[in-house]
Image (cartoon, grey):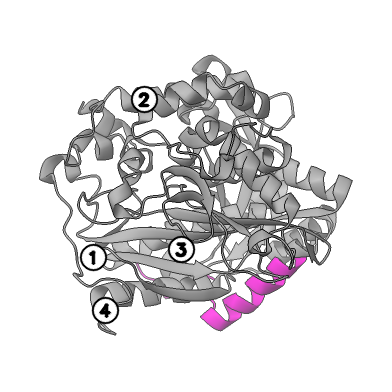
Amino acid sequence: MSTEFRNFLALSYDELEDLNLQAKADRMNRVSADSIREKRIKYLTDEKRIKAVTVLFSDLEGRLHLLDYDKKFLIDSYENLTFDGSSIRGFTAQKESDLRLGIDWSAFYWVPADVFGTGKVVVFGHVIDKDGTPYSGDMRGVLKAYSDKLFNEKKWTLNAANEIEGFLFAGRDAERNFHQTGKFDFINSGGYYHSLPLDPLRQFIDTAAEVQRAMGFQNEKDHPEVAPSQFEINYGYGEVVAAADQIQLYKLLCRQIANNMGYTASFLPKPVVGVNGSGMHTNVSISEGKTNLFWDPKGEEKLSKYGWDFVDRILTHALDICLILNSSVNSSRRLDPHFEAPNQIKASATDRGSMVRIPIGNSRSMRTEVRSVAPDANPYLTLYSIFKTGIDGSTSKLANLRQAERYLPDNIQKAIDDFKGSKWIGEILGTDVQGRFVDLKQASADRCARALGTFVKAPEVQFHHEVYNQSLWNLF
């Protein structure tokens, strides 16, 4: 089809970065929702080169969903965007399927045309129940409500940054085809920090980093990881909801860029036995104004008493939240102590096998790092459970809590049992969401071997939530 008469928006990467950083500053400064909405609608109305707005939302497992709305329709109808919730796993039953999408105008991104398509912008949405209240299964809305409540009541800002590892495999759709091939093929055999400047892994990392920079991620560093064909692309700290949004965008853009290059970006926690798995080390802190509540130059490891109390509550409830942080059958493989796995329910400044690490920091950067999080976890549910537990949880009277000989489960069935029987989970999520999450995880676990064994089984990948579709499940 001829494109001669088309005139769709396709901005340079420098222009994109400027626009996204301006939007990020508005979000960080908590410019009023009404003001942001008016500005965005005016922009969409005036910018004739935009044809569609992509609205993003996530289901209970953390799977990202994309809906394209015609721009003119969205401007007229943004307060009544309905969709069928029964088609989203973990959302409503078929007999009560109507849900609505609200627009979070502060979470608005200008995107590279060569990755997302021309004439499009992206915005995150929140799910609204049929009675007009926030939908309990939308963990982004739950996280945002909790973050806003703490800011309004205490002037606290919840901060997070995630180090997300992944693998780059040869061929498109390598995960979807795993039940036929039974293997993943590396495209690089280097190791930590090691690759030629223009080898396929380095080119992928460079391209993804350019896209992140254009989208206002404020990159820090990127490099090949320890395992062959493994990568990590780090970016700046942010307010907790924005940080969770960036996790979803990071995985989305990595997958699309890999696909464009003829590869597959995989965020399975342990796709290949015998080499290091992938984690999503989650750095968190709390600030009050410009004061970092986790910093104390005289504290143990420079962490304040409040910071240590936060850590103690995480350790206390480690078994309660393990299924949230390690939510797939395959994620249990990663908790293997032979590959630097953080499976010990401990806190340490040096031991990378501990669930929680205390990194070196200063008055601005002091934080705690929850290392046991897998990259396929729901980022909104993960960050909500970590902050809610660290702030409001209880503290065990167990002797030597921070160094006790305790371990995270090595299989998902045990994690499901701990989660299902947890009073704390029922309190922070509600028993309805607790039950729905258990049902989803049990359905996947029941299709996989209870004993993991020494090689990755096809069902671990086939029924993994990131590659879920009806066709794959029907193959069981």
Q: Is residue 369 rendered to the left or right of residue 23?
A: left
Where's residue 320, x and y in %?
Answer: 54, 30
Q: Quadrant of residue 424?
A: top right
Q: Residue furthest front?
A: 399
The C terminus - image quarter: top left
**Range of residues picked out in magenta:** 1-26
List x then y, in percent, for residue 132: 74, 29
Mark 3 residue type: Phe
How much space separates mark 4 and mark 1, taking CA atoms? 10 Å
Check disc 4 and report its element: helix, strand or loop.
loop
**Depth check, front residue: 316 or 322:** 316
Dot label at residue 413? 2
Q: Would you name the residue on which mark 1 appears?
A: 228
Residue topped by disc 3: 116
Q: Nearer the viewer, residue 395 or 221?
A: 395
Q: Position of residue 402 (x, y in %)?
A: 56, 44
Residue 195's disc is 4
Q: Is residue 44 magenta?
A: no
Is the residue 230 above or below the residue 313 in the image?
A: below
Q: CA distance from mark 3 to mark 2?
A: 38 Å
x, y percent for residue 364: 71, 70
Residue nearest the viewer, comparing 40 with 354: 354
Badge 1: how crowded within 10 Å, few (<14), some, or many (20+)? many
Say above or below: 400 vs 303: above
- Quadrant containing the N terminus is bottom left
Q: Are marks 4 and 3 in contact (CB under 8 Å)?
A: no
**Closer to the observer: label 3 or label 1?**
1
Residue at the spot 53% in from the left edge and 60% down from the top edge:
349
